[in-house]
Amino acid sequence: MSIPKGLGSWLVITLLLLLLAAAGFVANEGLRLGDAEVPASGYIAMALGVTFSLVLGFGLMALLFYSSRKGYDEPAVLIKDPKPEADSASPASDSK
């Protein structure tokens, strides 16, 4: 593991640690809000949202692997028309 050397690296690390601390603070405050009753429809909506997100994620990953295996992700290649063979197309070769 390398140690960051530049000022920019330390600035990014500091910013990320501050964001982590802010997320932890917001999560802690959210848990201490009190007793909030969640109706059954709220749990159903959350379950449907999670299920839809997972199905969408799995479907997109399946399409990604499918397109990679079939070669759809390869760069385009120009296919030139084959030139007709000179000896079979020329009338000189049919002399009798």
Image (spheres, grey):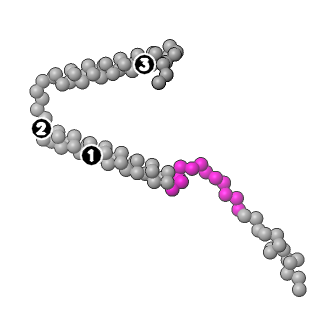
**Nearer to us: label 1 or label 3:** 3
Query: Which secondary structure, mark 2?
Result: loop
Q: Main secondary structure of the magenta part?
A: loop
The count of marks equals: 3
Sequence-wise, the earlier of marks 1 and 3 is: 3
**Nearer to us: label 1 or label 2:** 1
* Circles 1, 3 touching at the beta carbon (< 8 Å): no
Q: Is residue 57 above or below residue 94?
A: above
Q: Which residue is mark 1?
A: 51
**Nearer to us: label 2 or label 3:** 3
- Viewport quadrant of the C terminus: bottom right
Q: Nearer the viewer, residue 90 or 11?
A: 11
Mark 1 → mark 2, Cα distance in angstroms? 19 Å
Query: Which secondary structure, mark 1?
Result: helix
**Residue range corresponding to the magenta coloring:** 70-81
Mark 2 → mark 3, Cα distance in angstroms? 41 Å
The percent coordinates of residue 24 (x first, y second) are 27, 22
Q: Which residue is mark 3?
A: 13
